[in-house]
Amino acid sequence: MSTQYAELDGQLRRCLNAATDEGAITLCALLIKPLSAIAAHCFPAITSAQTQHIVLDVSWLALKNAQRLNNQTDWHPRHWLALIAVRRLQTEWEARDPDALAHWQACLQEAIEHQRPINLDARRPVHEPDTAHLDCLALCQRLGIAPAAETTDCLEQLLPLDHPVSVLDDALTSRLLAGVAAYRPVRHGDAPMDDPAFTQLSAPSLRWAVRRARWQYVWRERLKSTLGTPLETGLFAQWLNAGPLAGRLEADGLPRRSVENHLGSSLDITLDPRALTRSVAFAKEARAQRRRLANRFIWDGDWDRRTKDLRTIPQFTRIADIWAHRLDLRASSTFMNYHHQLDEGRPFRSSHKGIALDSSDKILAFLDVYRFYLEDMACFGLDAEQGKDTIGVAVNRDGALVKINKGLHRTAMAQVLGIDQARVRVRAVHRQWWSHVVQTEHGHDALQRMSTELPALEPWMT
């Protein structure tokens, strides 16, 4: 038996790491029979199409996150894959159980009404040993079977993979490979219009607009790296070493990118994202101010007095709506709103993302991207390394953390799912807090004094 398991683990590892169509097909073919059987047992009313959706999700989640297995030494590939399947079945149960759905909605509503964190049970990454054990126990209870004593034995009991490999039909294969191409990790610095998940939503009418947006992005980044960054670096060195322009540079707010490059991870804070309830609210007419502050680390003014509940912004309501209706995205208000725009002849378009929602199928595909990202986060937690940029926060004048624009969708997802741990980056501080902390220090000593204060900061609670 150990030889058989070793061969299976070797096959799974090759499938996950090869990044080939054949590997993806083999992985899905290994999953479809046992996962379909357990889904049918858990959800008697489930359709064949819905079962295939679960199988595809598990396959995509495993392939997208294969690097985690390479960095993970606690689980064999078959157990790692089974844990993803168990968690995906758990989110399916949450969506299908009326009581669970009602409780989730009540928690969101209560948090918004009383302006406090969402009181959801903490959802931890699936491969943490204690979490994995609890997930297995919960699934065994729903199946009405006695769990094995060890988590690994329980996983093999729940999802035996040593079976004849199924043959995928052409339609399922096509969907599988389209998702594999779309759901690749997005890393910091990737251009927004090059997100592979949205490539399917492009339109011929946007071709030139997207090219122009990409050209502007490339040239902006090139100018930044060849002119802006060297100039900022030189000025920042003046400030660090008390040069003649040091006072002027600090009065102007210090270049944020230079501060980030200098302090690096010292600007990062690990916190419970559910506690981030306030977001900075720049007025529409203050866009110029927001652009002016974009590369300043020290912010002057009353921006920290103009905040709003993070759970009332469009990004949060959209994400919550998608998660609530993930079994039927057509029933979501978000789908209806986009379709209303389509019916009026003004479909949603974005050259920034390179998409045009000019059909019902494209609207559904757009919403399904976010649904999958939610499933991904429900399984693996909030990964600070993924996304176009780091999730950003600012320190207000009282030394409390408030959310800023960077990473609003990911923060909303974490709150909707009950994720209890995330790494964020301080991208700005209020002038008054800065002055209170650094006092008479300047340059290196001022940054050192400030950075030692950051780990103790907490989100602003109203």
Image (cartoon, rainbow, N blue to C red):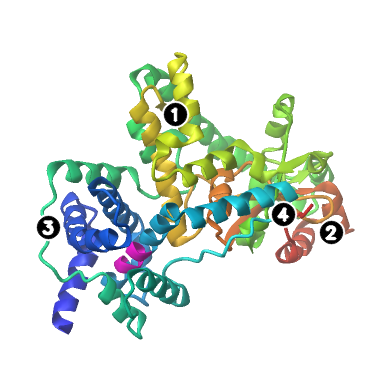
Instruction: Calculate the distance from the C-alpha at mark 4 to the C-alpha at mark 3.
Output: 49 Å
N-terminal of the pair, mark 4 or mark 2, is: 4
Which residue does the numbered mark 2 point to in the structure image?
438
Residue 421, x across and y down, in percent: 58, 63
Q: Please identify, in this view, whether the residue under mark 2 or under mark 3 is nearer the observer.
A: 3
Placement of 263 over or under 408, stated as above or below:
below
Q: Is residue 145 above or below residue 36?
A: below
User: What is the crowding at mark 1: few (fewer than 14 residues within 10 Å), some, or many (at least 20)?
Assistant: many
C-beta proximity under 8 Å, tags 4 and 3: no
Give the CA separation, mark 2 to mark 3.
65 Å
Distance of label 2 from label 1 (alpha carbons):
41 Å
User: In the rendered structure, does residue 392 fall within the stretch colored magenta?
Assistant: no
**181 with respect to 161 (left or right):** right
Per the image, label 3 sits on a secondary structure element best described as: loop
Query: Which residue lies under the disc numbered 1?
Result: 214
Amino acid type, callout 3:
Ser
- CB atoms at circles 2 and 1 under 8 Å apart? no
Labelled disc at residue 166: 3
Whole-percent x, y for residue 268 in the image? 63, 59
Pick the front one: 137 or 377? 137
Dot 2 or dot 1: first in sequence order is: 1
Quickly name the residue at label 4: 116
Residue drawn at x 54%, y 37% as measured from the top left: 226
Magenta residues (range) = 81-86
Q: Amino acid at mark 2?
A: Val
Residue 281 disc label: none
**Are there few (<14), some (14-19), or many (20+) residues within 10 Å of tag 4?**
some
